[in-house]
Image (cartoon, rainbow, N blue to C red):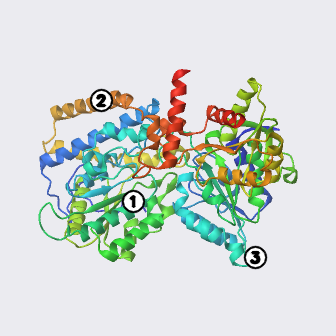
Amino acid sequence: MDPFDSLIQLLDCNGSLVEDSHYHSTLDGPALLALYRDMVLVRQLDVQATALQRQGELSLWAPLLGQEAAQIGSGRALQAQDYAFTTYREHGVAWCRGVDPVEMLRFWRGTMHQSWDANLHRLYGYQVIIGAHALHATGYAMGAQYAGRVGTGEAGRDQAVVAYFGDGAMSEGDVNEAFVFATAYQAPVVFFCQNNQWAISEPTKRQSRVPLAQRADGFGLPGIRVDGNDVIAVHAVTVEALNRARSGQGPTLIEAVTYRMGAHTTSDDPTKYRDSADDELWRGRDPIERLRIYLRAEGVLNDDLESELAHEGVSLADRMRESCRELPDPHPLSIFDHVYAGADARIDEQRREVERILSDGQVS
Amino acid sequence: MAQLTIVQAVNQGLRRALESDSKVLLMGEDIGKLGGVFRATEGLQKDFGEDRVIDSPLAESGIVGTAIGLALYGYRPVIEIQFDGFVYPAFDQIVVQLARMRYRSAGALYLPITIRMPFGGGIGSVEHHGESPEAYFASTPGLRVVACADSTDAYWMIQQAVASDDPVIFLEPKRRYYQKGEVDISADLSTALPLHRAKVLVEGSECTIISYGPTVATALQAARLAAADGVKLEVIDLRSLSPLDMPTLIESVRKTGRAVVVHEASSSGGVGGEIGQCLMQSCFYNLKAPVLRVTGYDTPYPPSRIEDDYLPDADRILDAVEKSMSY
């Protein structure tokens, strides 16, 4: 079965609107144009970061190519008071949470373990351990419940939490335990699974015999399968799931069906394990192109706006290129910072040893 | 003789293990069609089939736990944990279940499982790709823990680990994966150095450097530099972290009277401390200086741009030697 069958869809691959019996988009022309801009720019960001890795400026990069709609549609559904936990591929979500692309590069250049200020952006840093943060998101959501920030109906007060992970993570114990906790407490958490069809070399069928969203039934939470390359549908289903969470109706699992157009990371070679015919098939389902067709047909997007956006993309890429090289290396002594809340005798002694090594190095 | 990198030697060793025992199975994430992210299992699924070289779901605890079940059925699973930093979800299955089966069942059940794991830093990668978790396993009764440092050992030790009737944690030095060496692949397994024996790589008289895995090459480099200054260091590749080959270490330290232990893992609670204690107990009167350690610091693994300041290098080893000599 093509994983693309029977999905919630509001905009088809040809750029035409689709009726759905339940979901209706409330997004007007300017709002859709804003989503289009986001998608174009995060693709540019991704292309530029991939190039920086190829030039040796980054040690690694996990491309989001093809997943722009899933990330932007859901990321823009979040409200300021919400909180998100992501994997290492959600640059688009980070973009929506106001993280500067140059800041994102710190992690991949190896200058910091966490690229941005989690409290400021209400976005936890890139999580590399598959699925671990699904539990963190659930606990954070339980915290919002205990703090009385759920179901008050007061605008801007009620909080929801989103846990982003992939199809592979659905096999991890932590993710399944997160479903158990979330439903046990009806925590205000949305599990947003980007099923990009591939966990490195392993296809989704290695992780599950049934559509991933169907697993939700057994845990007792709604499971929704959406066309992850349809930014309008992704936005609509995420808005509803977040509203459910904020209003105290509990967790939701969203399976956004998409495709990883690129490699798992820049260290990976997908030609070893998958057929390029699939790449072709999914190229026809591109998340950006269909919105472009629709917006042009509606007269919302025109040549002038497109060239303006292209120009903005070039400036972004230029700035990333220049600023990446200028990202400061951490001081070697920072190895010893933030291990514990207070002073520690062992750490202090080892710090002095490195101080001595560094000063000897300067002499010679 | 064949010229093999360490990762090729692991691959060849696994191939031979699969050929010589039909009960041997390989299982792990991306090990089949892709051949592993480091290509350690490249070509094996093609030649031995999907039932013997198994791509697993993405669940480390699941991999170890089902390997235990397969072993109870009579198979001899060799599983891959893709990176050192990904092993922790499987910790319960390894430490509580795998390590204790023989003891708990009073010898009725046993688990001949090998857990392969690339370990150590220095590859410039992101978080959780450069860890040295060996002390957790070396301090767990019931597990055998070994680390190879060259192609010959990679080739033979993986076969010995697979043949072992106890669970073996098999550590592969990922930043040395592409280091080449001559391997006599036609020899018989029974002629290889026993799995739990340390190996004296360079003989010397003034100080013993004990290391394993990726820092063996660093120790050898330090020995070359010291030799240029007329200082004769003895270099030992520990190979087995649990059990320790104390007779080999004791013989060396009785001769030199000095020892420096080198590893990437943090010093506190590490393998170096155990070696130091055992040496103190066995050669107290031969020691001319306390056993010293050159290790990663007692911090989490740092961001890659400063990993070189964290990892032991030849200069730090030579500093420790000098400290030992002038004690």
Q: Is A233 displayed left or right of B84 in the figure? A: left
Give the residue pinned by disc 2.
A319
Structural distance between the alpha carbons of marks 2 and 3: 65 Å
Query: Can you say which quadrant of the picture contains the C terminus of chain A?
Result: top right
Residue at 21%, 34% (x, y): give it. Answer: A309
Mark 2 neighbour class, 10 Å CA radius: few under 14, some 14 to 19, many 20 or more: few
Is B165 situated above or below B229? below
Query: In x, y percent, where is residue B179?
Result: 68, 36
- Identify which residue, B195 or A308, lies in the foreground: B195
| Amino acid type at image mark 3 | Gly
Could you say which disc has been placed on residue B107 in the image? 3
Instruction: Indicate the secondary structure of the residue bearing disc 3.
Output: loop
Pick whichever of labels 1 and 2 is earlier in the sequence.
Answer: 1
Structural distance between the alpha carbons of marks 1 and 3: 39 Å
Tag nearer the camera, 1 or 2: 1
Mark 1 neighbour class, 10 Å CA radius: few under 14, some 14 to 19, many 20 or more: many
| Amino acid type at image mark 1 | His
- Identify which residue, A261 or A90, lies in the foreground: A90
Residue at 31%, 75% (x, y): give it. Answer: A185
Give the residue pinned by disc 1.
A133
Query: In x, y percent, where is residue A194?
Result: 37, 56
Mark 3 neighbour class, 10 Å CA radius: few under 14, some 14 to 19, many 20 or more: few
Q: Is B175 displayed left or right of A317 in the figure? A: right
Q: Is B82 displayed left or right of A336 in the figure? A: right
Q: Which chain's residue wears label 3?
A: B
